[in-house]
Image: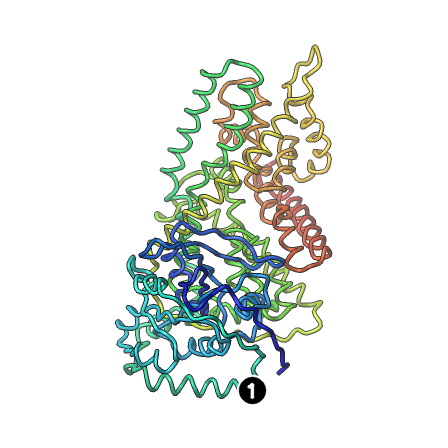
Amino acid sequence: MVEATLAFRPGAASSSSPPERIALLGNPNCGKTALFNLLTGSRQKVANYAGVTVERKEGTLRTATGRRVFVLDLPGAYSLNALSADEAVTRDVVTGKSSEMPPDLLVCVTDATNLRLNLRLVLDAKRLGLPMVVALNMTDMARKQGIRVDAAALSRELGVPVIETVGVQSDGARALVEALDAPVNAAAPRAWHAPGFDEVLDTQREVRRILAATVKEPVGSLATSDRIDRIVMHPLWGMLVLAITMFLMFQAVFSWAAVPMDAIKEVTAAFGELVKHVVPEGMLQSLLVDGVVAGAGGVIVFLPQILILFLFILALEDSGYLPRAAFLLDRVMGTVGLSGRSFIPLLSSFACAIPGVMATRTITNWRDRITTIMIAPLMTCSARLPVYALLIAAFIPARTVGGVFNLQGVVLFALYVFGIVSAMAVAWVMKRFRDSKQHSPLMMELPAYRWPNLRNLALGLYERAWIFLQRVGTIILTLTILLWFLSTFPSPPEGATGPAIQYSLAGIIGRGLEHIFAPIGFNWQISIALVPGMAAREVAVGALGTVYALSATGDDVAGQLEPLIAGSWSLATALSLLVWYVFAPQCISTLATVKRETGSWRYVIFMAGYLFGLAYIACWITYRVALVLTGG
C-alpha cells in the first residue's frame, strides 16, 4: 500500500478552555446525521467544501451554561485511508491537510449495535493525538437487541471518554452537550500515514480484543433484520417489494397532494384577484398578475407533490432500506456495466440531479462514476414534476384503474419507468465503449432496520421546502419577470389585430424557435417556455402561464392554464412534451455541477448533446405515432 504522511496543524484548543469547535466523525449509517440534527436543530446550513462538491454541514449548539459551540458534520468514512472523495475530505479535515480550521474536539460517533465495524475508525482517529470523545450512539436499539455495552470499560480500553447518546430522542444528547462545558487538553498532533497491511491486521486484532472485553451480544441478535431480509433481499420477492414501493410512491404524489394543491390554487387565484382590485389597470398590474402571480404562483402549487416525493425518499433512507435496494439491484445493474453502488446516486437524482451527481463521489471506479453521472439526468427530478403534473392533469382523465389505482398516478409511474429504462439503455451503450467491461462487485454495510424518525423527516422536508421556495423567490421569480418583459416589449404597432405578445421580443424568439420544434409538435408558446426552462425546470410551467396570460383576450387566463392547454393542444403535442422532459438537456445548474465534479467541459458538452439528440428523436417518434393513432 502506498505510504503517505500528513502534518497536522495545531488548533485553537488550550488546556484550560472548553471546546469552541467540534467535529462529528463516524461511519455511514451510524446515526451521525441524526445526532447532528439533534444538536443543532434549525441552526444549521449546508454548503460545499472549498474546491470540491462534497456536502458540508455545519451548525451551532448552546450548552447548559449558554456557550455557543460550532459543530461540523464530517462526511461518513469507514477509515482515514480514503477511497472516495467523501472520505478524502474527512481525512484532510481531521489530519490538518484541509484549509478548514481543525476542531478543538473530535466526537467519534459509533453505532452501539455494530461496534465491530465502527471501532476501526475510532482507533485510527485516536492515533492522531487529538482531544476526542466517543459518542456511543443508538444505545436504545442496542438494548432492544439485547446487546450490552459496558461504556465504562470501553472508555478504559480506548483511553478516552465514552458517552451514551440516542440521536432520535429529544434528550438523547444531553450528556454529550453537558460534557462540552468541560475543558479539553491541548492537541498533541502526530503525523498520519496510510496504514500498511500489517497495521490493518493489528487494528482488527485490537478491535476484537476490545469487543471481547466490553460487549456481550446475545445469540441471534440480528434475527429480526435477518427475517425481513429473507423477503426484502430475495431475488424475486425483493424486486416485487421494490417495484410496489416505487409504484405506491408515485400514486401518493397525485392522490395525497390533491387537497393541499387545490387550497394553494384557490389562494393564488384569490391573491391575483386582490391585486387586480388594488393595483390600477396598466403596466404594473400586468407585471404583478401576468408575471409574478401567473409565473411564480403557478409553480408553488406543485410544492405538495414535491414534498411527498421527498418524504418517501427520506423515509426509505432513514429506515435502512436503501443499501438493501442497492444490493438487490447490483446484479441487474451489472448487466449494463454498473454496480449497485450507483443506485443511491440515481435514486437521489429523482429529487434533483445535482445531489445525485454529487453522490457519485462514493463510487471508487472512475468509469462507473462517469457513467452514473451521464445517466443521472435521466432520472426524473422533482423539478420536472410540475410539468408532468400539469400535462397529466390536463390530458389524462382522473379515473380509477382496476378499482384501485389512479390512472394519472399510473401514467406518472410509467414516465419514471421510461426514464429508468432509458438510463439503463444508455449505460449499456456506454459499456460497449469501455476498455474494461468487468463488473465491479459491490461491498456495502447493511444497517439494522429502524423506524424513520419523525423529527428528522420533518427537518428534511422543511429544508427541501425552504430550498424550493428560495428558488421560487429568486431564480424562478427573476426569470418569470424577465419573460414578462420580453413578452410585453416592444408594444404592438398601430393596427395590429393579434395579441400583443406576438409582436414582442418573446414572440419573435418563439416564432423563430418554432421552425426547429414544429416537427415534434411544439407551438411558439411552448418554444418560448423551453428557453427559461434551461435555468430551472419548474419555470416552464410559470412561463406557459405568463405567455398564455398575455396571449389571450379573456380574463383570469393565468388561473386557467390547465383547461386552456387541454383545449388548444392536441394529445400528440402533450405526449411529445412529456417525452421531451424525460430526455431534455439538463438545467444549467446540473451542467455546472458536472463540470465541477469531473473537471472537464467535454463531459458537459457530451451530456447536453446526447440528451438533446435523444429528446428530439424520441419526441419526433412519439408525435408522429400519436398523430397516426389519434387520426391527426
**Residue shown at the point (58%, 37%) measured from the top left:** 540
Q: Identify the secondary structure beneath mark 1.
A: helix
Place of residue 469 in the rendered image (x, y in percent of width and height, measured from the top left): 48, 40
Quarter occupied by residue 374: bottom right
Which quadrant, please, contains the C terminus?
top right
Whether residue 224 is visible to the viewer of this picture, yes or no, is yes
> Residue 413 at what x, y percent from top left?
47, 51
Q: Residue at x 53, y 53 (%)?
A: 47
Q: Quadrant of residue 363?
A: bottom right
**Looking at the figure, which quarter contains the N terminus?**
bottom right
In the figure, 70 relative to 467: above or below?
Answer: below
**Nearest to the observer: residue 632 or residue 288:** 288
Query: Which residue is under mark 1?
Result: 197
| Residue furthest top as drawn | 495
Asked whether 480 or 513 is in front, the reply is 480
Q: Nearer the viewer, residue 18 or 217?
A: 18
User: How is the rendered protein coloured?
Assistant: rainbow
Residue at the extreme front: 16
Left or right: residue 164 versus residue 103 is left
Count of marks placed on residues: 1
* Amino acid at the residue labelled 1: Phe
Q: Position of residue 568 (x, y in %)?
A: 56, 28
Quadrant of residue 316 within the rendered picture: bottom left
466 relative to 266, above or below: below
In the image, residue 610 sits, relative to residue 123, either above or below, namely: above
Residue 324 visible to an observer of this rendering: no
